[in-house]
Amino acid sequence: MSTPDDAERLSPLAQRWPRASKFLLSGCAATVAELGTRPSSLGLPRSTSRGRPRVGGRGVASFPSGCNPVGPHLSSQQVWRGGGKATTFPLDLTKTRLQIQGEAALARLGGGAAESAPYRGMVRTALGIVQEEGFLKLWQGVTPAIYRHIVYSGGRMVTYEHLREVVFGKSEDKHYPLWKSVIGGMMAGVVGQFLANPTDLVKVQMQMEGKRKLEGKPLRFRGVHHAFAKILAEGGIRGLWAGWVPNIQRAALVNMGDLTTYDTVKHYLVLNTPLEDNIVTHGLSSLCSGLVASILGTPADVIKSRIMNQPRDKQGRGLLYKSSTDCLIQAVQGEGFLSLYKGFLPSWLRMTPWSLVFWLTYEKIREMSGVSPF
């Protein structure tokens, strides 16, 4: 005869440690979104006549090997069949290069390359990377990007749901006011990005290594782990959080666009239209969230990238900008207001499919692991 302790021990991990499970599930969904962006390749199942996705059999969506904490029936075969067939990471690298391009503050400091380099749009920037640095350099920084998304996505999703379910609370009819969702989304972004700042710092700096080589400057890092070690040795623990202020500002705006829009649109569709909580609703909501997140987050992303990539003195202080506000003022005065939207097109082209794959995958693996829908 089983005891209560036996029952608890045999119960799924999702029921015993719900927050830890949601952290791992969101991290795995983010990894899938970072590597593969074709929804048809993810093996996401078709809806049944009741509007709910099928579970089991062909078309099972799951997550990568090693990220299976919630149930033995979740395989990674179908996900990895598509992950890697198409990827949006080169758009992220292109976006970062565009955001640094033509930096007025660097020209004033004496960066001759910044003055002589002609402005190139998204396509020419991407082609230039391939021609000048090699095709594989389009994926430079992908490893810290994956590290970052595991920590960032896990932190933001757990924080948002905790605020929504425990702190703010939904009404009895499951209505969740927009103002609460906005606050929750921004706070979730702050928490997730603060935790992930070291990985984001390494990602941005590694993405600029190819440009430094073309300019005749010495490379700073031999790899991801060397980058972490070097930053830690030169700036200490504090150095790993360089640029954290503009980073969390960006994350707050992006998640106000992403989490708030997805949550609001999804529950509006479920409560006010014939649509049910299924893959169609998830897809429509994620498309809306990707667009809004790009519009709100691009200016802060430009500021973040410039502050993180700026040269620093021996004490770790930036040589170009005193703060995110100073960076904002210098960018607008030296390059015009539209400089804040450098890299918007690749950012949007990346954010939209990323958001689509993340939310479809996340909702599906939550269902399959016994966790309630988002």
Image (spheres, grey):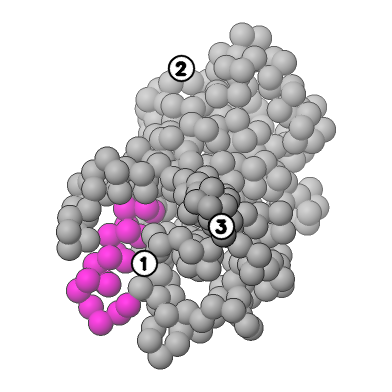
> With respect to residue 314, does 320 lie above or below?
below
In the image, the segment drawn in magenta is: 257-276
User: Residue 180: horizontal and vertical position, in percent?
Assistant: 23, 46
Give residue 303's mark: none
Which quadrant would residue 197 be assigned to in this image?
Answer: top right
Q: Residues under labels 2 and 1: Cα distance?
A: 39 Å
139 vs 350, left or right, is right
Kindly identify the residue that appears in the image at 50 percent across and 47 percent down: 17
Circle 2 crowding by C-alpha within 10 Å: few under 14, some 14–19, many from 20: few
Say whether residue 269 is magenta.
Answer: yes
* Side (left or right) of 169 relative to 344: left
Q: Determine the main secondary structure of the stretch shown in magenta.
A: helix
Q: Amino acid at mark 3?
A: Ser
Q: Position of residue 360 (x, y in %)?
A: 49, 67
- Residue ID for mark 2: 322
Mark 1 residue type: Ser
Confirm whether residue 129 shows in the render: no
Which mark's residue is nearer the viewer, 2 or 1?
Answer: 1
Q: Which residue is mark 1?
A: 285
Q: Which type of secondary structure does the marked residue at label 1 adopt?
A: helix
Q: Which residue is the site of mark 3?
A: 2
Q: CA distance from mark 1 to mark 3?
A: 44 Å
